[in-house]
Image: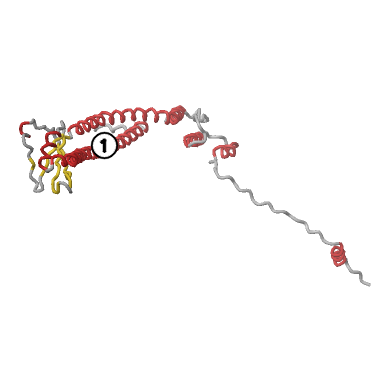
Amino acid sequence: MTAPRRPLGVRARLTAWYAGSLALVLCASALAGRTVTRALLERQFDASLAGSGALASRFFRAEIGEYRTVEATLVHLGSEFVFPDRRIDFRRPDGSHFVVPGAHARPVARLAPPVRDTLVALDPDLAPGWTVHVDGSAAAHEALLRRIDLAFLVGVPLLALLGAAAGWWLTGRTLAPVRRMAQAAERITAASRGDRLPIAVPGDELGRLGGTVSCASSPLPRAGSARRSRECAPRSTTPRRRPPTRSVTRSRSSPSSSTSSSSSRAPTRRR
């Protein structure tokens, strides 16, 4: 037969509960923080792509007065707009790409995955149906998210371990009076049953428990039973109410009434 497992002590259980709760809160906070950070980065990147498309639209409106036609203006803009982390294309109203002459001679920007894109209207009045297609690489944002994940993977367990160490120390300080009372109770024998347990703060829960145990383990002679009942009786926190005092008033009788009463009580003589 296997020996029964020794249960964990109160200090170990409290520390485990505290460390587990702290780790759960930290994991939930890290997950919520990563979700919010990712959403903010994606929103910022999409706004940046839309800003690039809006910049192309503003340049188009500024240059079309000089080049007169949409195609000529886009040829000029295609040679001007070059970005290292994004690619700008123009699309006709039927959805086909507008190929800028001589674009094949220029090196095409290779975008690292993941790639996000957006469509912005070129100009509803000057170029109806034409759109600006912007592709952008979100590799920098993904790298930032990976660094955040690495920080969470390292920081959450480290904080949980520090919390467990702090919980172990705090529970040790909290349970120190209980340990002292347990050691004193183990030393109490039949010859020393009058010894009382050490009580640090008599007014708290541990103090009341120690006082109750001390009263229960200290027998007194019969002559002192009244004293024991006074010392070990539970103290009520609610004040006692005094019974209302009654004022006794004496009624003073008038002389005529006293005389009449005395005369009525006097015996009558027979003739």
Q: Quadrant of the C terminus?
A: bottom right
Residue 245, image x, y percentages = 68, 51
User: Is the residue 172 above or below the residue 51 in the image?
Assistant: above
Asked where in the image residue 151 lies, by quadrant, the reply is top left
Residue 67, image x, y percentages = 13, 40
Q: Return the residue nearer the eye: 254 or 179.
A: 254
Kindly state the secondary structure of the residue where label 1 is placed. Answer: helix
Q: Residues within 10 Å of mark 1 (few under 14, many from 20)?
A: some
Is 111 placed left or right of 173 in the picture?
left
Residue 133, image x, y percentages = 14, 41
Q: Residue at 6% x, 36% y: name it.
A: 101
- State whether residue 49 appears in this view: no
Q: Return the residue nearer the eye: 268 or 42.
A: 42
Q: Residue at 30% x, 37% y: name it.
A: 29
Residue 34, image x, y percentages = 25, 36
Q: Residue at 42% x, 31% y: name it.
A: 174
Return the residue at label 1. 37
Q: Return the residue nearer the eye: 30 or 177.
A: 30
Is 177 placed left or right of 93 in the picture?
right
Asked where in the image residue 153 lies, by quadrant, the reply is top left
Is 266 placed left or right of 148 in the picture?
right
